[in-house]
Image (cartoon, rainbow, N blue to C red):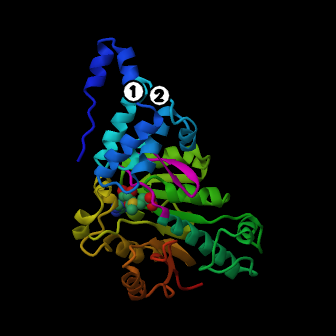
Amino acid sequence: MIRLRLPEIPALVRRGSLSLLARSCPDVEACLRGGTLVLEQAGIETARLDAECLLAAVLGCPRWRLGLEPHRRLLPEEFGRTLRLLQRREQREPLAYILGTREFWSLPLAVSPGVLVPRPETETLVEATLAAWEEMRATSREPCAPPFGSNTRSPELDAARHAPCGGNRGAGPTIVELCTGSGAVAVALATELPAARILAADVSWRALRVARANAERHGVADRITFRRGDLFRAVDGRLPDNRADLVVANPPYIPTGDLVTLMPEVQWEPRVALDGGADGLRVAREIIEASPARLRPGGFLLLEIGAEQAEAVQGLVAAAGRWEPARVRCDLAGRPRVVATRRRGM
Ligand SMILES: C[S@@+](CC[C@H](N)C(=O)[O-])C[C@H]1O[C@@H](n2cnc3c(N)ncnc32)[C@H](O)[C@@H]1O
């Protein structure tokens, strides 16, 4: 592995040899070429892209601008900062931790060490939740929206989501989101469902701090209440009639024994966000058992799952005896990603 060498730079700055240092600083393209090589040597598949993101962050410009000024020479300060960021990435620290941000559902979200980096496949959980709410509205009154399995980002469904429908005009869902982490799912749902009220919970104070900041940044903090605690213990007694319309969670679901086999970047993320116990289903099992008492009849439970867990989770749902048969929704890569089921007794 190639190691970046930084020590000369502060020394040169201290000695006042800035002009010497300035002449030895690379231009944008040379810096990107060198950075890409270093990250490739560290085994990073997206080496060029990552080098561009890091340099763009240092220069405070969008990534595409780098291509407009390939021969712009970096200032010593800029070069030093870029080297430090490349060094962190070379250690396989997640790019999102280094940049402090990750996009989810087209929303820029703050992330920091101690919080799971939101994954693109979790957008499937948001889609499934929106579809489930549309299905609830449709089945409780005249049909006004396509059913659960269909694409939820169509203009027709957008119109249906915001249109008053049947006797429940203007009423939004009460949603419980367990395991909220950075608040990605809660914030995305709150921006999509302007009348929704959301109770979001996590065991981690660090995660909740980040989640609150994300809700404030996107102007939805007045509709999301964040609570710290173990699953439903964090929200019990805070639901109107103790009944939510929707319970949503992306719980930790990696089997403990698989954790060491995951990419180096994942090893930087909090274990409590990943470790789902011996079979990966410890938290999902508890949520499936505990949700019926907190959901209104006909309400939906939606769980993100690992790609290999669909059958096992459908089995847990069936064994609980309180749910309609579980349905599975796939992510954009075609892998099973969300299990959705309705509480019996509509
Ligand atoms: C897989 S992460 C999901 C984070 C976020 N919802 C997302 O999709 O990016 C799981 C989260 O569950 C939290 N967690 C783990 N066990 C928990 C428990 N028993 N009660 C509440 N939260 C828990 C972790 O702190 C972590 O933030």
| Quadrant where ligand 1 appears | bottom left
Task: Decide: is 319 above or below 107.
Answer: below
First to last magenta residue range:
100-120
Residue 242 percent coordinates (x, y): 52, 67
Q: In this view, does 14 lie to the left or right of 75?
A: left
Give the residue at x 36% y 52%: 204
SS assignment at label 2: loop
Give the residue at x 47% y 28%: 73
User: Which sits in the foreground, 50 or 178?
Assistant: 50
Residue 65 percent coordinates (x, y): 57, 39
Q: In the figure, residue 27 lies in which quadrant?
A: top left
Give the residue pinned by disc 1.
Answer: 25
Residue 318 percent coordinates (x, y): 42, 88
Asked if disc 1 is less than 8 Å from ligand 1, the answer is no
Dot 1, crowdedness within 10 Å: few (<14), some or many (≥20)? Answer: some
Q: Which amino acid does label 2 sit on?
A: Arg
Task: Decide: is 42 above or below 252.
Answer: above
SS assignment at label 1: loop
Q: Which amino acid does label 1 sit on?
A: Cys
Give the residue pinned by disc 2.
Answer: 73
